[in-house]
Amino acid sequence: MLSNACKYAIRAMIYLASRQSEDVKVNIRDISAEVDSPEPFTAKIMQALSKQGFVSSLKGPTGGFYLETKQAETTLLEIVKAIDGTQVLDGCGLGLKTCSDAHPCPIHQEYSHVRQHFNDMLENNTIIGLAQAMHGSNSVLKNILTI
Amino acid sequence: MLSNACKYAIRAMIYLASRQSEDVKVNIRDISAEVDSPEPFTAKIMQALSKQGFVSSLKGPTGGFYLETKQAETTLLEIVKAIDGTQVLDGCGLGLKTCSDAHPCPIHQEYSHVRQHFNDMLENNTIIGLAQAMHGSNSVLKNILTI
DNA sequence: ACAGAAAAAGATAAATTTATCTTAAATTTG
DNA sequence: CAAATTTAAGATAAATTTATCTTTTTCTGT
Ligand code: FES
Ligand code: FES
């Protein structure tokens, strides 16, 4: 559904939001340890998020990544658009060049609904909202298998 | 959402189903022309579908691919499982190693619903059903942009 | 039998995604 | 100012997906 890069991005941002109140900056090492993602790859992704204004960063000792209040209100939809693009959000389920009511593929009607459901979910969830919900629940950002 | 391979597979099978009544075998050249997919890649995919029993084939002149009655009743879900695997069908939306109610990621509840919606759609649609619906509508398997 | 047609199989290549490595730039603290 | 720490940037590499090419096998019709 989403690329690894996008999944890491969302997990990282939720983690940053969960530490937002502490007013500290979090370095790449901590982020990738906490969200269980490859460190250099995560660095690249954070770089991209930073360049596009989704996260803030500061270099040097005690530096790292952090979220400003407004950034924590980013929706998942915005992140997906920024990292993965819009194909998964509005493209044809069977890969036709255009998805339209005028020239629909055989699954157009039903697939459009699924896609809309997906879009809605992404749009109705903000990073800060998910971070807060996580606090009052047993939700996790990584799972070290305990089965 | 789905890989190119899987999209081509579904489009190819719907096309075969749409010609099922003619009792002819369709060669790769025709299939890829009609569903607008790269010929050698499509050949590989048809080979895989054939090996797994989703389509039938016959070599030699007048040979090609075709569907038996039972094969035309394949659901999209079966094809997706065979080509793309189950990750997209039951994997965690944020990439955790396991998706479970016990250790849910922050989007688990809502994502599960979207995923279920997707699974239902795939399970409730058979190749022959889509092929028939296509006949009585303006649906298409390729779109040569006419905008 | 033979020639031609078609799928099957296997080898190879290109493109994309994922991941890593190295160097540079910026910032803080002593 | 100097040293250490950390992001930024750029180059490189591995893995996966997508795509192509070549050869072999099988079948049909003459
Ligand atoms: S045309 Fe295929 S999903 Fe709309
Ligand atoms: S744990 Fe992430 S979707 Fe279920």
Image (spheres, coloured by chain):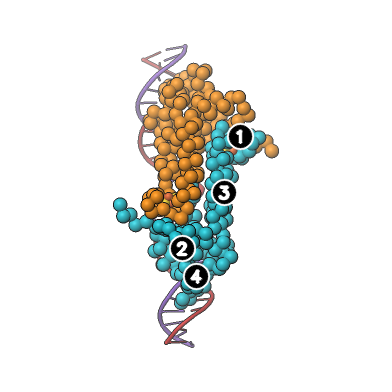
Chain colours: A cyan, B orange, C red, D purple
Measured from the top left, where is residue C1 in percent x and y? 36, 15
Location of mark 4 (residue): A21
Question: Residue type at mark 2?
Answer: Tyr
Whichever of labels 1 and 4 marks the residue nearer the N terminus, that label is 4
The answer for how far apart the CA atoms under marks 3 and 4 are is 28 Å
Q: Is residue B84 visible?
A: yes
Whichever of labels 4 and 2 marks the residue nearer the N terminus, that label is 2
Whichever of labels 1 and 2 marks the residue nearer the N terminus, that label is 2
Q: Is residue B38 visible?
A: no
Same chain, labels 3 and 4: yes
Q: Which mark is residue A120?
A: 3
Measured from the top left, where is residue B20 in percent x and y? 50, 21
Q: Which mark is residue A104?
A: 1
Chain ID at mark 1: A
Whichever of labels 3 and 4 marks the residue nearer the N terminus, that label is 4
> Are circles 3 and 4 on residues that touch, CB within 8 Å?
no
Question: Residue type at mark 1?
Answer: Pro
Q: Residue furthest left?
A: A147
Location of mark 2 (residue): A15
